[in-house]
Amino acid sequence: MSDMKQTLLAIGCLFVAGNAAASSAGEYMAKISDCVACHTTEGGAPMAGGKKFSTPIGDIYATNITPDKTFGIGNYSYEEFEKAVRQGIAKDGHPLYPAMPYPSYAKMTDQDIRALYDYFMNEVPAADTKNKDNEIPLLLSARWPLHVWNWLFVEETAPENKTGQPTDLLARGAYLVEGPGHCGACHTPRGVTMQEKGYDASSAEYLTGAMIEGWYAPSLRNISMSRDELKDLLRMGRSQHDALSGPMSEVVTQSTQYLTDKDLDAIAFYLLNFNHKNGVPVAADGAIVYAPTDGKTLYSMYCSTCHGDDGKGKDFTVPSLVNNTVVNAKDPSSLISVVYQGAETPQTHGNISFKMPAYKEVMSDDEMTNVVNYVRGTWGNGASQATKDEVSAIAK
């Protein structure tokens, strides 16, 4: 092949690769905000709604946010779109349910909201999918109390403060985590009216861990890993010593794997800024009481092949159980769920998914309790005992 042909071929390959990797500012913001997670049901058109969410007052369904003019948001002006995203108020004036994280989106800049609007109106294919009716008892279906809820918990929009883009590393990380990333929606405990107990770092409750869909989303404060390891988790769903599963696996697949390296740096820097511990947290020997014989035997039979007798796993493949966030969480639900139903790391570009088998048909509730407590009480892990009732609750 001539030098000229090789040069043209190389230029062509770079052009194609560049187009494949490119995305508009709006598409990037939609991925950071993980819009697809709530507004796309399995087998449905992208952003066409229909996904069910169970709430204390009944089941609600995500709406169609494609530019379809009959069932979607095709008739929304930018001002109406901005009001829905930041304030939770639909075009016709009714308040949206705060299953949509608009208290977090209220922190987004005008520039990013405008980019989102342009993306939804011009790049998302319209889908004539009718919205599903919510399944809420009549006595609980009134929406006027949500105006009071919004008044209490949603910050006032101040356009003059929302025009610029945060560029400082810490400020950018705070913006992404507290705003479009809405990490607190899963990782912050909620109050009696289902509001997050804190929406930014000024609250002592913010990102301290919470239950979500039968999983415990661990505290994001005092993370004991390096910035590079945290970035690997967000980008690939696994790092040298750890791996993600459960609802967070979907977040990586649909959202965080698309973050730029600069934004990954910012998020990791912000989260690790909460870290006030010196060194790695460990428990004193003998602090945890568990059934060592049964738990250790079961671990050796079912777990040690992959995780090792020392619990350290295999780099970038099998997570270490030593000082593991899920293992040491104050609520053992996520660890129990992993043992009970198995786990799968996210499928991301250039990285295959790894699976852990489920043991629900293999272990009894007593056996599962013992192996969970063996893991939580060994190798210096500092977690309290799980109970058989907690295992049985996950099994149900």
Image (cartoon, grey):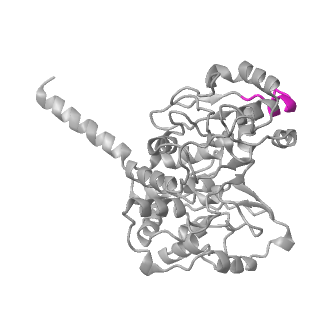
Q: Is residue 67 visible?
A: no
Q: Residue at x 64, y 55 (%)?
A: 187
Q: Residue at x 86, y 33 (%)?
A: 365
* Front in this rendered view, residue 148 or 268: 268
Where on the picture, by quarter, is residue 321? top right
* Position above or below: 208 against 340: below
Q: Is residue 7 visible?
A: yes
* Position above or below: 202 against 283: below
Q: Is residue 253 magenta?
A: no
The extreme left residue here reads: 3
Q: Residue at x 82, y 26 (%)?
A: 363
* Front in this rendered view, residue 308 or 263: 308
* Position above or below: 64 against 308: below
Residue 84 shown left or right of residue 171 in the figure: right
Q: Is residue 361 magenta?
A: yes
Percent position of residue 152, x then y: 67, 78
Q: Residue at x 55, y 72 (%)?
A: 86
Where on the picture, by quarter, is residue 376? top right
Percent position of residue 145, x then y: 75, 78
Percent position of residue 2, x then y: 12, 25
Count the labels in the image.
Answer: 0
Quadrant housing the N terminus: top left
* Front in this rendered view, residue 77 or 378: 378
Where on the picture, by quarter, is residue 313? top right
Percent position of residue 92, x then y: 63, 78
Quadrant housing the C terminus: top right
Give the residues drawn in magenta, as a range: 358-369
Residue 72 shown left or right of residue 359 in the figure: left
